[in-house]
Image (cartoon, rainbow, N blue to C red):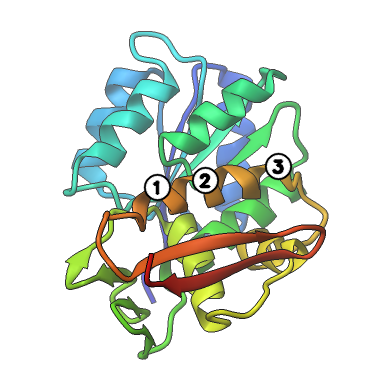
Amino acid sequence: MARNKILVVDDEKAILDLVTQMLYRHGYEVFTASDGDSGLLAIYDLRPDLVILDLMLPKMDGWEVCRRVKADPEVRGIPILMLTARRDERDLVEGLNLGADDYVRKPFSTAELSARVSAVLRRSTGTEKKILDCGDLKIDLENESALLRGRELNLSATEFRLLERLAERFEKNVTRESLLSCIWNTSNCDSRAIDVYISRLRRKIDDGETPVFRIQSQRGRGYRLLEAQE
């Protein structure tokens, strides 16, 4: 069985060595880059299964690398896990809005990073052969795509997994804890990230046509995906 290829992009040698050794121990094939320019080139050359991307990089910062990857249909399906030493919540929100699939704040434990890597890879590869049919919205789990009125939505791996969970319980409530568990395999993560993903999904499923698909907030309970005539 082929090993998952992971590209680590970080300009701190100590971090690069630590992450590389941890990934090797878990059986991954690891590649590295120490600046944004070479990291972006490596993404196109290697087509890795996952990119672990530092935000504060020389030559091209991590936000710009993420923006370019997620804007290009050729590589946008490659999941990105961001590393950040910045504490400002706006940095987290900006990264998620650009399409990042997860994030880890520095300093981090190798156990936490390993769990996040495993969760992102499961979300991006672990599907069964079936389709969730919500009328004009269809979720193809085999091909990891969502079609709205026959047009494919541009979703990151994490957005797809979140939409899948909402579609599984179409027109029924899904708790925030369930969504957190679905995305990060735990309910003990920063729940504010869910709000960012929900906001992005709302924009992406709003094509201005009828019936419309809405993600309705259930105060104190969670969210539900609905179809409405107006």
The quadrant holding residue 36 is top left
Amino acid identity at mark 2 = Ser
Secondary structure type for disc 2: helix
Q: Identify which residue is drawn at 57% across, 17% down.
A: 12
Residue to which mark 1 is pinned: 203
Secondary structure type for disc 1: helix
55 sits left or right of 150 in the view: right
Q: Choose mark 3 or mark 1, whichever is in front.
A: 1
Q: Quick one: 22 or 136, which is closer to the camera?
A: 136
Please state the horizontal and vertical placement of residue 179, each as a whole percent of the image. 66, 64
24 sits left or right of 187 in the view: left
Question: Is there any visible trace of residue 39 in the rendered image?
Answer: yes
Outermost residue toward the front in this view: 230
Q: Identify which residue is drawn at 47% across, 76% down.
A: 126
**18 to 208, vertically: above or below:** above
Sequence-first disc among 3 and 1: 3
The quadrant holding residue 133 is bottom left
In which quadrant will I find the N terminus? bottom left
**53 to 121, vertically: above or below:** above
In which quadrant will I find the C terminus? bottom left
Q: Identify which residue is drawn at 76% across, 44% down.
A: 190
Question: Is there any visible trace of residue 102 in the rendered image?
Answer: no
**91 to 134, vertically: above or below:** above
Q: Identify which residue is drawn at 66% across, 37% down.
A: 104
Residue to which mark 3 is pinned: 192
Q: Label 2 to label 3, Cα distance in Å?
A: 11 Å
The answer to whether the residues at label 2 and label 3 have Cβ atoms under 8 Å apart is no
Secondary structure type for disc 3: helix
The answer to whether the residues at label 1 and label 2 have Cβ atoms under 8 Å apart is yes
